Amino acid sequence: MIGQAVASLRAGRGTVRRFRRSGAWGIGYAGLTGSGFHLILRGTAWLISADAPPVALRPGDVVLITSGADHGLSAAPARLRDLPPVALGLDPPEPGPADVEFLCGAYRLERGPAHPALAALPDPIVVPADGDQPERLRALADLFDADGLRSGPGAGVTWPALLDLMLVHALRRWLARRPEHGRLMMTDPAVAVALRAIHDSPQTRWTVTQLGHRAGLSRAAFTRRFTASVGEPPMRYLTGWRLNCAARLLRDTGEPLAAIARQVGYATEYAFAAAFRREFGTAPGRFRERQVSGAQ
């Protein structure tokens, strides 16, 4: 379920930025629709939340933003409303020594809520450093700045893969320490069968009856249990998953719209375009143009 939850984010635009700060600094992050992380590479900082006491952070600690909670980072305990908003951009940080260095990465979803498994978790959460974790995570962080990965050929594919790896690694480490929350990312076993069918074969023209049969339940019982477990009815989830898959294909491949439509279960390009516009508020072609221009 972790992999599926992280995969659902790839419909969004992935961004990564390294920060270096000294003195009395602070950054506020607000209005994120999606999920992301902060990785402390060197020095110390404080995590600032709206409804919780500040949390001290040290090298190797990871802050996970599971579903877009407003938060901030600062040199000392502070009030969230007093932190200046982050300046978005991909400009490299100033060279030279600094009191603290950290990496920030996120998937920004243009439309729709976080995956139910992520929305069920606390937000934000801190994954403490453990053993040689700081060194291993720093090596992973250095890949984001490697020559060619920022803007060279294949950058649009490499960055999401690294983002995925960082998010999955941090989630697994945190869930290993919090088994009670791990259960929130697991679903009803019967519903899990149907979810696997949807995820593995979004192009199949599933009906509620067919999915219920896969789960070994009547149509009515399946609908009740699926909705209770996932948070939305089966057909609505199926549509959302198909269109998220389509968004990833639009961003990561150059396949024509008709081919993408078939891969995600739409008989015609017109039907696919209409559904995509309802979900994302823009036409598939325009969505692709924005994703490509945003990665350059």
Image (tube, rainbow, N blue to C red):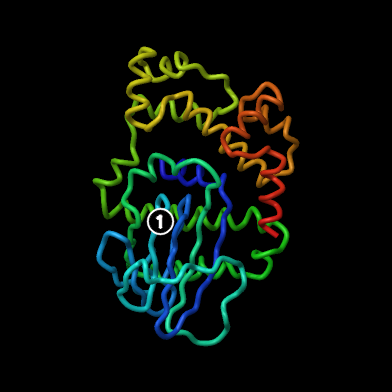
Q: Give percent across and percent down for residue 40.
A: 41, 71
Q: Quadrant of the image for the C terminus?
A: bottom right
Residue that label 1 marks: 65
- Residue 289 shown left or right of residue 178 in the figure: right
290, above or below 102, in the image? above
Observer-nearest of 184 and 72: 72
Tell me the quarter of the picture where residue 283 sits: top right
**Residue 288 sits above or below residue 230 on the image:** below
Give the quadrant of residue 17.
bottom right
Q: Residue at x 48, y 27 (%)?
A: 236
Side of 42 where 272 appears, left or right: right
Q: Residue 205 location, x and y as percent?
A: 57, 19
Density class for disc 1 (Cα within 10 Å; few <14, some 14-19, many ≥20) is many
Q: Residue at x 32, y 70 (%)?
A: 79
| Quadrant position of the N terminus in the picture | top left
Mark 1: amino acid: Ile
Of 156 and 76, nearer the camera is 76
